[in-house]
Structure formats: C-alpha cells, structure tokens
Image: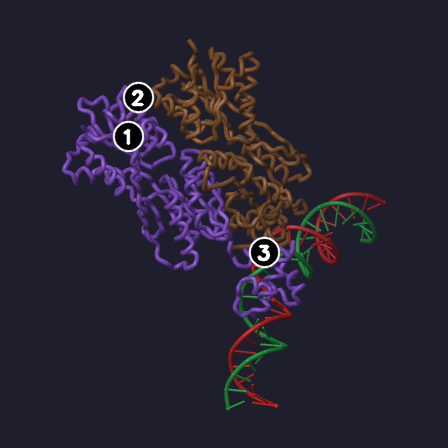
Chain colours: A purple, B brown, C red, D green
DNA sequence: GAAATATTTGTTAACGGTTTCAGTTTAAGT
DNA sequence: ACTTAAACTGAAACCGTTAACAAATATTTC
C-alpha cells in the first residue's frame, strides 16, 4: 500500500508538501502540485482514511438510524431512504445503517464515530435516543416524524396539507358521507392526518359525524376491523380515508369479504403510496409520502450543518403528492 | 474525550498496560486488569477506532453492496438482508451500504476500507465488481446469485429444489395442465427455477408441453402479458407457476381483466414471498426465498473467513419454504 | 544590488492506539 | 539467602496523515 511518503520520495519533496498538494492547499506552486498529482495517480495512491480520521477528528461516516430494522419498518421505507441519501451524499462519506432498538450502549454513539447522524424516526420510542444524540453534540437531523422540540433539525412531510388535498379531491367527486380510519393513538402523524381530514370537511361545510371516525393502529388487521364496523353502519360512508396504505389494504380485504364493490359502492383513499398500492385491485388512490425527498433534503441540511455548525435548526416540510388511481369513483 | 493515557494516569500505570488490560492480554495481573477495567468503565472510556484501525490495519467495517440501490432492488430485499446481517454481526463492526452501479472508482474499494464485503448480487452486471474484489484480496461472500466460480464463497437459495417441492404440491392437488412463466433470459435463477419446474413434472410423468412455457423478465408487465397469452390458448392450463411474485401479480391482474376466477378456474404459484403476496386477492401461494437466512449465513461465513483467511470457499444452499395461501385450489 | 517581502517548501510534533524489546518484580528451587 | 526462571510492567517506536512553525527561495522595492 502506497503512502504520501512514497509519493514524496519519487517526487523529491517532503511528505508534507504531498499532503498539501493533494488537499488543494493554495500554498503549493502549481507545477509542483501537478507533478505530485500525476505521480499520485500513476502510483494509484489511495489515502488512508484511518490516519486522516485520527488527525482530523473526523470519521467520514454518516449514521442512518431506523427505529427498528427487525420489525415494523416497512421495506420501501428503508430503500427509499437509502436511495435519497445516496443521491446527495458525496462519495467520501460512507453511510452506516443501524436499528435504534438494537443499540446496546448509547455510549458507543460518539462524535468520533459519526460526523453526523440521520434519524429516520417512526416511533416515539426513539426519543431517548434523540435525547442522547443531543447530549453528544453530534450534528443530526430527525426525518419523517414531526418533533415538538424547536432546537432540532427536523424534516417531515406535510401530512395535514396532503390529506386535505386528497379529501378535497374526493369531495369534488361528489362524496358527502366520508369516514376516516385513524392511525395509532398518540402518534403525531395520526393527529396531523386527522386534522387534514377535518380541515377539508370543515372547509366544505360538511358535518363531522362521530360514527365515521374509527380507530386503527396502522396495521393491516386494524384496517380490516375498522372497515368492518363502518360497513355495519346503518348509513355507511361512500368514501373512506385510511391513515396509511397498510390499513387501506386491510379495508380492501374487508370489502372483498363483505362483497362490497370498489370503487362502485365505496371509494378508498390511502396514505404513503407504498409499492403495492399500485397492484391492489383496484389500484389504490393514495397520498405519496416522499421519503426519498425527505431523506435527500435532510441529508443536504445535515451536510450544511457539518460545514457550519452554528446554523439555526429548522423544521422543514416537504410536499406530499396525490396519486390518483382507481379506488375513488365519482358519486352518481 | 478520554484516552488510554488518561486511564493510565489515574491507574498509575503506563498506557501500554492499559491497552493490554483492555484487550484481554494474558500477561496482565488479574488485579491490575480489574482495576483498570473498573476505571475505564467509570471514566466512560470508548476506544478511538480510527487510531485502532491505523495501527491494526483493520477498518472494523463490513461493506454491503447491492447491485443497485436506485433501481430494481425490491424493497423487502434490502430490509431482509440488513436484518439478517445485523442479527449476527457483532457490535464493533459497522455495516456500510452501497450500490454497485454507483461506485465511480473501483479503486476506492480497498482492503483498508473494508475488512470484508457482502455482495447481494441480483445481476450479472456485478461480475466486474466481483472480479475487482477478488483482485484486492478483500474477503468477501456473494449472496443470492449463484456463481459458477468455485473459488468464491457463495450463499444462495436452493431455488430448484424449492420450485420442485411447490409443483409437487400442486400436482398432488390434481393439477395436470401446468404452465410456467419464466424469468429473465440468461439469469441463473431463471434456469434453476425452470429446472425445478421440469423436475417435478418429469418425476410425475407429466408431458412438457411447449405452449405452457412462456417467457417473462421478472417484471410485473411481463407476467401480465404471459398470462394473457396462456389464457388465449385453446386448452389453457389449470396451474401456472410464475418465476417470481412480481410476475405473479401481473398474472393476477391479467386474470381479473379476463374475468378468470382465482383459484376456482386457475391456480397460481409465485416465488420470493415478497411482502405483498399475502395481501393479493386471493393471497398468493408462493415459495419463500429466505433472504434474511442467506444474509445471516453469509455473514457468519464471512466472519469465519476473516478469522481464518485460508478456509476453503464453498457454495452453500439454504432451503426455501413453501408458503401455502389461497391461490392454489384442488382440481375437481 | 541589498533589504524587504511574498511565496514556497521542509522539520517536527502531534493524533490514540499496539507492539517489540528491555526492565523490574515476584515466585521457585537449592 | 541466592540464583534463576516466570510473571508482569514500561519505554519507545510506529501506523499514515495534518498542522504549526521554521527555513529557504523567489520576487519586489528603492
């Protein structure tokens, strides 16, 4: 393995000069730099990052932490996140992936090991970890889950606005009897989406009927159950908004089971645009949650933060997108 | 940040002794070791991995390379792989994730940066990369895609056996007119699965009818098209094996479009057990490809390799599992 | 053309660990 | 008690890089 000292030897200069030349230090004369760069290229020099890290006190790695890798993390989530991050993370950073729930010692998460951290948070259980991060002083961003702490850089989707837009669309198609299957109690996303739902109904002067508000927990089962109870109502809704696609799929299965035709008798809107929402029957109209975009923006902001550590933290929203497929029909 | 020298100072010994004590070197007296360990714990000592790396010439990182992260990689794939790896990778290794197609310079993949590499290969395009790896001498395993090179540690699913088993099951249910939608031409997995298909038919003395062999490319569309052509046959099959679940979903949609009832008129078997195969209508009977197990075994083998570099490379197969759901019915 | 200044390069010491080799205890043997 | 071996500890060098400071060389300036 060749080092800057090897280069120095063949170039007839000191290794310091080589270091400077290769790092674009302006003190070096152009000709010397060119010569050194040529030699380095010829010799196939690759810097030793361990040595660099040691002296620079930089790790050249960014940590990506999911709430859990083992359970619950929807698959497309992980891919989309990694995808988005890779798009903007330049090549001399490497990205390590972790599950928060499998960290044994928070102490191992130190500024020395991570230049920066991305937390793709899906649960309030992450708060302890986030708090620890704050203590260490590692620059970090929390993605996906809206936080109340204004001192933390936070990038999330504008769920409320997105849901409102989707419901506006449904109402525009003539729906008046509209229900919601809510997400897991206590989650910020649950209340945000519910708010968006109500925003739309209220702005169209539609009544908020209690029977049409059903509980769920973001799981497929809960969507099934909630839909079953909605279908049992004496005056069932014509449009149901499911707070995520998983529950929408459960709801869909409930309709099959009850012989309810979609979208003829009942229309359905989901949230997330998971991969398979396009392969359900009928394909699901849903609200795309731009995980890749969130990750991308978050990474960009994080890197900004690394470069100037005293920039003010902000809460950023990225727009959702209404994906119109075939699970919503006009009311005749 | 506290270092071994700090510990040495409070313990009243040299930093050498501390290093030894903390690394389990047997030369150190038990009492000294205990004392040092206690102090280290109290002081919340965390070793500086950059320094360790520098002197030990170890990076403490394992690289996980997918064919691509941006495109094509099915989502569950990524999660399952990471999941499996995390289960067996001990905590002082960190796992970095990469897409082979976005590596700009192979030169950056050096033994210094990676103690070992896991290649989750999904395409022949990875061969150039694998070849480069071989050159560098980094210990590595190729997962998921069967290689012909016996010099490479390779962990794959036993597709052939798995498909045979699934078809045996279908034949046991009375099916005699059985078709296959093949995978992408040229892929090893395509021929393996086709072989398993034929194995079963032949062992049951069923004829191999050419019309029942249709081409696909592992994409949803191709499954749709292939199924359309099968349904147009004058004597259509009663059971169709789709070489992956994506194509099975395409096939399913073709059936909807043609008004063919599943599994009443036609039975369907997929391959992979992707997340959504349980939410199709009817839920898909399929062959689970144990990506997590493959990753787990691969990681274990890789670590073994790191510890004794001269162990012989092997090709390992892990068993698939038939997941019986409701897309296959008995012939009446 | 010498002094002053600007530009370029080199010397040396870190960074935080491990390891070789030498030195000091402690225990054993006589 | 006295040598001798065994057990333990320490001093110093090293891993490959950057950086503070010193030194050398080139360029102005008068």
Q: Distance of mark 1 from mark 2, alpha carbons?
A: 13 Å
Image-based side of B228 in relation to A26, left or right:
left
Residue position marked by numbered label 3 in the rendering: A47
Estimate the x, y position of residue A266 in percent, counting from the top left. Answer: 24, 26
Are callouts 2 and 3 both on one chain?
yes
**Label 1 Cα neighbours within 10 Å, binned few <14 / some 14-19 / many ≥20:** many
Helix or strand or loop: what does disc 3 sit on? loop
Closer to the chain start, of discs 2 and 3, is: 3
Q: CA distance from mark 1 to mark 3?
A: 55 Å
- Which one is in front in this view, the residue at disc 1 or the one at disc 2? 1
Q: Is residue B253 visible?
A: yes
Q: How far across and how far down the image is residue B79, in percent?
A: 46, 36
Where residue A329 sits, quadrant-wise, is: top left
Q: Which residue is mark 2?
A: A256
Where is residue C21? Give x, y as percent.
Answer: 75, 55
Dot 1: chain letter: A
Q: Is the residue marked by circle 3 packed among few (<14), some (14-19), or many (20+) residues within 10 Å?
A: some
Please give left or right for residue B230 compared with residue B29 in the image.
left
Badge 2: how crowded within 10 Å, few (<14), some, or many (20+)? some
N-term-proximal mark, 1 vs 2:
2
The residue located at (66%, 36%) in the rendering is: B151
Q: Secondary structure at mark 1?
A: loop
Vertical side of B206 occupied by B125: above or below:
below
* Residue located 20% across and 23% down the image: A233
| Label at residue A13 | none
* Above or below B1: residue A156: above
Question: Dot 1 corresponds to which residue?
Answer: A327
Tell me the residue at 56%/33% (across/down). Answer: B145
Q: Are tags 1 and 2 found on a single chain?
A: yes
């Amino acid at each position: 393995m060749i080092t800057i000292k090897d280069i120095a030897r063949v170039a007839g200069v000191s290794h310091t000069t080589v270091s400077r030349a290769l790092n674009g230090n302006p003190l070096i004369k152009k000709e010397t730099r060119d010569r050194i760069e040529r030699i380095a290229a010829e010799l196939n020099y690759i810097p030793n990052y361990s040595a660099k890290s040691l002296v620079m006190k930089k790790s050249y790695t960014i940590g990506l932490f999911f709430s859990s890798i083992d359970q619950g993390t929807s698959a497309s989530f992980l891919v989309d996140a990694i995808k988005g991050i890779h798009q903007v993370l330049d090549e001399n950073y490497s990205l390590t992936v972790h599950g928060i729930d499998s960290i044994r010692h928070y102490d191992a998460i130190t500024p020395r090991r991570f230049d920066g951290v991305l937390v793709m948070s899906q649960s309030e259980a992450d708060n302890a970890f986030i708090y620890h991060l704050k203590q260490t002083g590692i620059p970090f961003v929390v993605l996906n889950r809206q936080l109340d702490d204004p001192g933390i850089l936070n990038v999330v989707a504008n769920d409320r606005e997105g849901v409102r837009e989707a419901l506006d669309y449904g109402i525009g198609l003539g729906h008046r009897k509209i229900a919601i299957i809510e997400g897991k109690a206590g989650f910020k996303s649950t209340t945000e989406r519910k708010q968006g739902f109500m925003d739309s109904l209220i702005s169209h002067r539609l009544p908020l009927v209690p029977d049409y508000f059903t509980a769920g927990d973001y799981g497929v089962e809960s969507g099934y159950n909630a839909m079953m109870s909605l279908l049992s109502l004496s005056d069932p809704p014509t449009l149901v908004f499911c707070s995520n696609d998983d529950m929408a799929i459960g709801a869909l299965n409930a309709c099959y089971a009850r012989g309810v035709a979609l979208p003829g008798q009942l229309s359905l809107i989901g949230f997330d645009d998971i991969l398979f929402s396009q392969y359900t029957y009928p394909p699901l109209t849903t609200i795309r949650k731009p995980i890749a975009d969130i990750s991308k923006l978050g990474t960009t902001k994080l890197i900004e933060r690394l470069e100037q550590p005293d920039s003010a933290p902000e809460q950023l929203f990225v727009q959702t997108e209404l994906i119109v497929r075939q699970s919503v029909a006009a009311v005749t």
